[in-house]
Amino acid sequence: MQDTLIKALSWRYAVKTFDPAQKITDAELHTILESGRMAPSSFGIEPWKFIVVSNPDIQAKMRSASYDQSKVSDASHVVVLARRTDVRENIVRELLDRAAKAQGKDASEMKGLGDMVAGTIASKSDAELDAWVRAQTYIPLGMMVETAALLGVDAGPMEGFSPDEIGAILGLKEKNLRATTMLALGRRGADAFAAVPKTRRDFDEVVEFVK
């Protein structure tokens, strides 16, 4: 399994050009999204939502909001990973409801957890809270990228877009969401970058063991 994982990660690269004629399967898409759904988050608050776009007209508009990057319009699907902007108002209640249901308890029995999470949120300024939530959105992104590689699906994670414009196209503000990052999924096209050797620092340079 270790060899399979490393081989898949060595195969993947940040795709710049997709073949617009090739689509990924529903099963592949669901597995990739499910891996993101299963991602860990601070206190389990899951402060994100994944908006999956496969409408060519909408993808064309999103391309215009993404510095005219062809992968946005040519990808089979584009996943917008958005962060919640209503964390102060709703996240604790939703967390307690989920936790109580999963554990077969009443939400009132989860007061300790609720107080801890609410205290953490209250201690942060608006800017700190947004940075905290924004950072967490990259956890499911990483899991989706890895899962896509294991499935042999090409992926292109990206930050090169206008969050305001993407938000306007998808109506995110009205849903208490803001785009953080996007993931284009599909099959690689004629892309010169595919043949470029992967450049990574050596293991011993990146990793330090403290014993």
Image: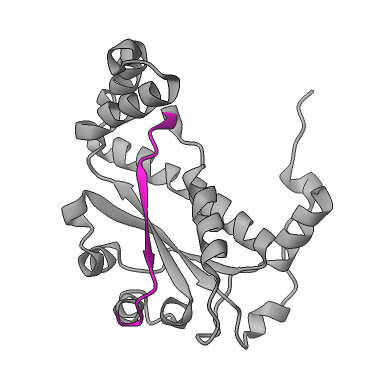
Q: Give the residue furthest to the front.
A: 104
178 left or right of 136 in image = left
Image side of residue 134 versus residue 3, left or right: left
Figure quadrant of residue 111: top left
> Residue at (80%, 45%) from the top-left corner?
204
Q: Position of residue 102 (x, y in %)?
A: 43, 26
Vertical side of 172 occupied by 77: above or below? below
Magenta stretch in the rendered image: 44-57
Left or right of 92 in this view: 188: right
Residue 90 picture quarter: top left
Question: Measured from the top left, where is residue 144 in percent x and y?
Answer: 55, 55
Residue at 41 percent of width and 81 percent of height: 73
Within the magenta stretch, is there residue 211? Answer: no
Image coordinates for residue 157, horizontal then vertical, percent: 51, 64
Nearer to the camera, 200 or 68: 68
**What residue is drawn where x is 43% and y is 80%?**
69
Q: Is residue 50 magenta?
A: yes
Residue 21 at x, y = what percent?
52, 87
